[in-house]
Amino acid sequence: MADALLQVRDLDMYFSGGRASSEGVRAVDKVSFDVKRGESFGIVGESGSGKTTLGRCLMQIQKPTAGSVRFHGKTHAGVELTEADAQTLRAIWRDIRMVFQDPQSSLNPRLRVIDLIGQSLERAEGLKGQALADRVSELLRQVGLRPEFLHRYPNAFSGGQRQRLGIARALATKPELIIADEAVSALDVSIQAQTLNLLMDLHDAFDLTYVFIAHDLAVVEHFCDRVAVMYRGRIVELADTQTLFDSPRHPYTRALLASVPIPDPKARKPRARIKPVEVAVKGVGCQFAPRCPHATDLCTSTRPETRHVGGADVACHFAGEI
């Protein structure tokens, strides 16, 4: 893809079972996708689907077991992140930043705001003194906080304000790509909306690209241009947002969308049901087969390849039929 900022190919992340168990966990399983420059790319799935591990592998916070992550930034064009040394990664991390799920634990409680945000500026641009304070004050304004907060500690802020501090810290080095890992899931609904609107405004103001990891489908529908649905480490469906929500092709995607609460009883429709008890498929076969209402012997014996069906890339043998 010519306009891809990030290219991911056959990414694997395997965790061994350790001494207590001979069985390991494949948290990310042959994942491939492109993130277009300027888009908001969503990754959704239930807890344990591997989406957070995938985000950490993109950043190289965790080194993937196999596969490729190639970054096509303005100052770091075509760099293979999985092969980059520590010095190269530190330089690239100025262009790729991460906003974490829990602002309570991701901000050092012993550092003042000027230090939390200013550390990156000191390393990247050598700013100090009044120049550093002015720059941090401007970042605070850009995320909707007052510059008078410069010398406060994180525990003086609400949860929504702390997440804004995390966003300001991510913006400090003028990145091209921000990976937001459940960035609004720990916030109240009203604060979620404010934070999403802020992220959208910053997207336009700073020409940002987002990888937005979430489990809340309503948030993803509102925020993202394209969406990848993960199940047990694999992307089972990838499509633009409207196509995915209007015409889901994978049984798991349909079940996820059917699980979204609908306040109006008259607007509710019969929901797709999936079995609540999971049985892991080892080796061959579709991982979703034990829960899928459409599964056949083919599903349990042969792993489905990803096919393009109805505007979506779907890993299902019967995507074009159900």
Image (cartoon, grey):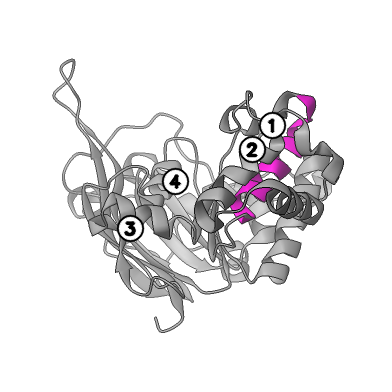
Asked whether the residues under the numbered discs 4 and 3 touch, taking CB atoms below 8 Å apart as contact, a structural biologist would say no
Q: Is residue 240 above or below residue 107?
A: below
Return the x and y of residue 211 as percentages of the image width and height.
Answer: 52, 58
Magenta stretch?
156-171
Disc number placed over residue 112 in the picture, else none = 1
Determine whether label 2 and label 1 are within 8 Å by CB: yes
283, 7: nearer the viewer? 7
Q: Quadrant of the N terminus?
A: bottom left
Number of the label disc, if any, that sits on residue 115:
2
Distance Cα–Cα, label 3 vs label 2: 24 Å
Question: Who comes first in sequence, dot 4 or dot 1?
Answer: 4
> Which residue is under mark 4?
51
Residue in view at x 67 percent, y 66 percent: 203
Mark 4 to mark 2 CA distance (whole Å): 31 Å
User: In which quadrant of the rendered view does residue 225 lie?
Assistant: bottom right
Is residue 182 visible in the rendered image? The answer is: no
Residue type, mark 2 in image: Asp
Mark sitting on residue 23: none
Tell me which label, 4 or 2, sits earlier in the chain: 4
Q: Which mark is residue 88?
A: 3
